[in-house]
């Protein structure tokens, strides 16, 4: 599939970014200073590796709540879809308490079946099973029956609504990782306003990234159309004159040389239809194993849209495909201890079990295991993070932003023991060229940190950068798909083949920002510098449930 592939061992190709091969325990890009806190190297324009610690429920470091039970459902021995949905609907009519919760629907121990999608569409509602994977058994087990469908939809309504007119950003250059910038007139904004920072897609910017020459089968391919916009969802933390400070740093740079006209801008928004404080937990879900083309109906796990401050935790999904579909309207949401297990191989184009857009998403201690042919995790088009995979495990393929410019991604202490050889795997922040009708550059300003994978394809987009720090695996150097030359420049490989400190970038950033209790709140030792997590036994990556031993959990 890819032309001019070269496997690099210790070799460094002249003219490409240097690869540090000496034994070392510190990164040159993020390192501890004499004050025992992290310090960050910047490039000549001020770009730096961002603070990823804002990813997750309530902006990171907040314990997922145990919402009180409002309604209990018992397994009927028949189709339980209507009973479970009726309980969700009943709880959805209850008043919100002071914490924004209505209540949880508890599935008593038993074996349930569902034949169509369950839906949560009101704030403060949680679907909860009995038992948990950490204790070795789920006691609430749901089997998906009938024609393929999505098990659970968690969705608000509508979209963000602009308030007033957009205001121009006036800095000639705003670096990636920055939290402050100037605007023409900040008088219409207040601290606490939710805003969209708008990065225009211009002909000049597309040309800078050389995405205006994609051709497939003799036909021009469109990467991102000129005139469209990439938006970053943030809140104003401070205002000083016409200088705005954001609650979370920017993931991309704003170079007005290529963005003007119209230039970067900021607009206030409201989102009345977005729901919050919603989730699902402690349930095992079993689908009928099948190997069908990704264009065909599939048993899927969870779709989520128009959600802020949500969670899915301690769940297992067996034989679902494209298991999680997380839209760009999801924010500050955690996916914790989720295992996706396949018992049949998939052939043809690979589905993706964790496919996400959105911002401030945290996937911690999740895994995808079993038969080959699926992508464990992909980011989608025009994604502005921070989005973090922490202690993510997969035994086939890896983490590959799929298409059309995702920024601010972190694969932190991921273990990707790929056995798939048909195409690249491991971690790829790269130019996908004419693949998939012009997927082109898939990522910028993204990091793999202390990650072990079969291969790494970390490339440098024009005007941007990607990083592989403390990584172990084979380095790939390639030309843009659809061409045979030239080879594209590698991104930054720092401390290649050597584990660096801190063990986890996300946990150390979180600990420094909010203290040790924030790290403990998300299930890690509450000490700074954040220590290594105990390596999970392979069996612990596949939570079990009562009566499920024969199914491989």
Image: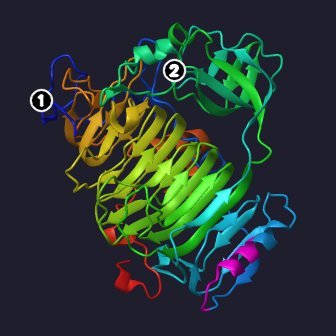
Name the main secondary structure of what is drawn in magenta: helix
Residue lying farthest right? 95
Quadrant placement of the N terminus:
top left
Q: Is residue 288 visible?
A: yes
Q: In the structure shown, which secondary structural element does the residue marked by tag 2 occupy?
A: loop
**Residue at horizontal 74%, vertical 71%?**
88
Per the image, is 83 magenta?
yes
User: Can residue 430 be spotted in the picture?
Assistant: no
At 48% from the left edge and 11% from the top edge, which residue is drawn?
A: 204
Is the residue 541 above or below the residue 470 in the image?
A: below
Which label number is shown at residue 94? Answer: none
- The magenta-colored residue range is 77-88
Could you classify mark 1 by the number of other residues whose Cα lies within 10 Å: few (under 14), some (14-19), or many (20 or more)? Answer: few
Residue 389 part of the magenta segment: no
**Front-most of 293 and 463?**
293
The residue drawn where x is 39% and y is 68% is 341
Q: Earlier in the sequence, mark 2 or mark 1?
A: 1
Name the image quarter holding residue 68.
Answer: bottom right
Quadrant where the C terminus is found in the figure: bottom left
Q: Secondary structure at mark 1?
A: loop
What x and y, as percent, mark residue 77? 60, 92
Is residue 352 toward the left or the right of residue 162 in the image? left
* Residue 348 vertical placement versus 34 (above, below): below
Q: Residue furthest front?
A: 218
Q: Residues within 10 Å of mark 2 (few under 14, many from 20)?
A: many
Quadrant position of residue 343: bottom left
Res. 511 image quadrant: top right
Reading the image, the residue beneath label 2 is 253
Q: CA distance from mark 2 to mark 1?
A: 31 Å
Residue that mark 1 sits on = 11
Image location (x, y in percent) of residue 329: 64, 44
- Left or right, 238 with respect to 23, comes to right
């Amino acid at each position: 599939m890819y032309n001019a592939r070269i496997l690099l061992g210790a070799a460094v190709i002249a003219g490409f970014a240097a690869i540090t091969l000496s034994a070392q325990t510190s990164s040159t890009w993020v390192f501890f200073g004499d004050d025992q806190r992290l310090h960050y190297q910047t490039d000549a324009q001020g770009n730096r590796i961002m603070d990823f610690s804002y990813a997750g429920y309530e902006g990171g470091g907040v314990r997922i709540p145990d919402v009180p039970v409002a309604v209990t459902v018992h397994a009927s021995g028949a189709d339980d879809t209507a009973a479970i949905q009726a309980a969700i609907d009943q709880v959805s009519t209850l008043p919100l308490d002071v914490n924004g919760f209505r209540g949880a629907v508890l599935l008593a121990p038993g074996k349930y079946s569902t034949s169509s999608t369950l839906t949560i569409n009101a704030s403060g509602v949680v679907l909860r099973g009995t038992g948990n994977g950490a204790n070795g058994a789920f006691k609430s087990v749901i089997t998906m029956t009938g024609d393929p469908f999505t098990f659970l939809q968690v969705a608000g309504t509508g979209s963000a609504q602009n308030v007033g007119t957009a205001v121009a950003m006036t800095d000639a250059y705003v670096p990636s990782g920055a939290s402050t910038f100037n605007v023409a007139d900040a008088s219409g904004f207040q601290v606490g306003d939710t805003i969209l920072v708008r990065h225009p897609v211009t002909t000049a910017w597309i040309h800078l990234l050389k995405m205006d020459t994609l051709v497939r089968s003799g036909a021009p391919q469109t990467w991102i159309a000129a005139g469209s916009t990439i938006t970053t969802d943030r809140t104003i933390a401070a205002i000083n004159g016409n200088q705005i400070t954001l609650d979370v740093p920017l993931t991309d740079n704003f170079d007005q040389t290529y963005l003007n006209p119209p230039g970067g801008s900021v607009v206030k928004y409201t989102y009345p239809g977005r729901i919050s404080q919603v989730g699902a937990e402690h349930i095992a879900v079993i689908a009928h194993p099948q190997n069908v083309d990704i264009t065909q109906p599939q048993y899927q796990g969870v779709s989520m849209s128009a959600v802020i401050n949500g969670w899915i935790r301690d769940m297992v999904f067996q034989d679902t495909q494209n298991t999680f579909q997380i839209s760009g309207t999801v924010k500050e949401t955690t996916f914790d201890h989720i295992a996706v297990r396949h018992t049949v191989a998939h052939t043809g184009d690979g589905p993706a079990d964790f496919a996400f857009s959105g911002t401030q998403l945290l996937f911690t201690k999740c895994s995808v295991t079993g038969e080959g042919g699926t992508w464990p995790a992909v980011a989608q088009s025009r994604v502005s993070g921070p989005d973090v995979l922490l202690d993510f495990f997969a035994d086939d393929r890896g983490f590959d932003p799929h298409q059309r410019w995702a920024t601010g991604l972190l694969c932190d202490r991921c273990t990707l023991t790929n056995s798939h050889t048909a195409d690249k795997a491991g971690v790829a922040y790269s130019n996908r060229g004419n693949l998939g009708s012009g997927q082109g550059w898939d990522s910028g300003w993204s990091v793999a940190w202390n990650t072990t994978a079969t291969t790494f394809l970390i490339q440098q987009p024009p005007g941007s950068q990607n990083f592989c720090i403390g990584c172990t695996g084979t380095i790939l150097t390639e030309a843009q798909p659809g061409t045979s030359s030239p080879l594209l420049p590698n991104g930054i490989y720092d401390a290649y083949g050597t584990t660096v400190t801190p063990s986890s970038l996300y946990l150390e950033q979180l600990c420094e920002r909010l203290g040790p209790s924030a790290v403990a709140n998300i299930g890690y030792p509450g000490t700074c510098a954040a220590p290594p997590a105990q390596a999970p036994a392979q069996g612990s990556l596949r939570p079990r449930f009562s009566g499920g031993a024969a199914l491989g959990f």
